[in-house]
Image: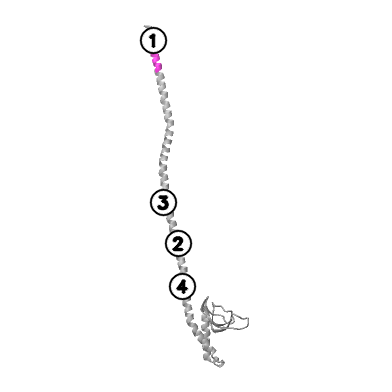
Amino acid sequence: MEEVKNEQETAKEEVEKEAGKTAETAGETSEEREDKAASAAPEEAAEKEEAENEEAAPESEAKEKKKKKRKDKRDEKIEELNDRLMRNLAEFENFRNRSEKEKSAMFEIGAKSVVEKILPVVDNLERGFDGLSEEEKETPFVKGIEAVYKQMMTALEEIGVTPIEALGQEFNPNLHNAVMHDEDDSEEINKVTEEFQKGYMYKDSVVRHSMVKVLN
């Protein structure tokens, strides 16, 4: 009986030891699991945050692209408007310059036409003075007409009307109109020897050519 009792106690002790080992093993596993869970928590949070950042990154990039696209379109529109403005300004400047030239040309044509109508009056006054005697030139009436003639010539000169030099000058077809020719043995050829009608210029253009005789 005692032997049976001893065997039962021994078996009981072995069972208790095994149970203690199992409990100890279970406790260590639980602690390790807690440690592993504690150490894994930051890693999981970091991975989760990284995943969220990765998900948010495309949205942020898309927004930036949209903003950049809007900005590019706005810049293109501004450049287009600036280019159109500069072209309009250039066209207006060209139009103004062209208008000024046309206006100046029209004024010169009009002034030249008026001068052409005044020149016959000047010619008649000069012929009248040439036909007067020395005594007649001294009369108050003639002196008054002469003063008016000088005033008229001064006014013409102020607006740019000048007489063309002809007598003794070399014949120039752009200024002189040869209506007669004279032959001479001297070396003075192609020279204007006589002036029948005085020519005039308005600024740089000829209003009337000088009517002359040329030595050939």
**Gap between marks 2 and 4, in whole Å?**
24 Å
Residue under the point 41% across and 43% down: 58
For badge 1, the amino acid type reads: Glu
Q: Position of residue 109 (x, y in %)?
A: 47, 76
Query: Which residue is labeled 3 in the image?
Result: 70
Q: Is residue 109 magenta?
A: no
Q: Are marks 2 and 4 in contact (CB under 8 Å)?
A: no
- Residue range (magenta): 9-18
Please say if the residues under marks 3 and 4 sit with CB atoms less than 8 Å apart: no
Of label 3 and label 1, which has the lower sequence position? Answer: 1
Q: Tag 2's secondary structure?
A: helix
Residue 21 lies in quadrant? top left
Residue beneath label 1, please? 7
Q: Cα distance, mark 4 to mark 1?
A: 141 Å
SS label for mark 1: helix
Give the residue at mark 2.
87
> Which mark, by number, is residue 103?
4
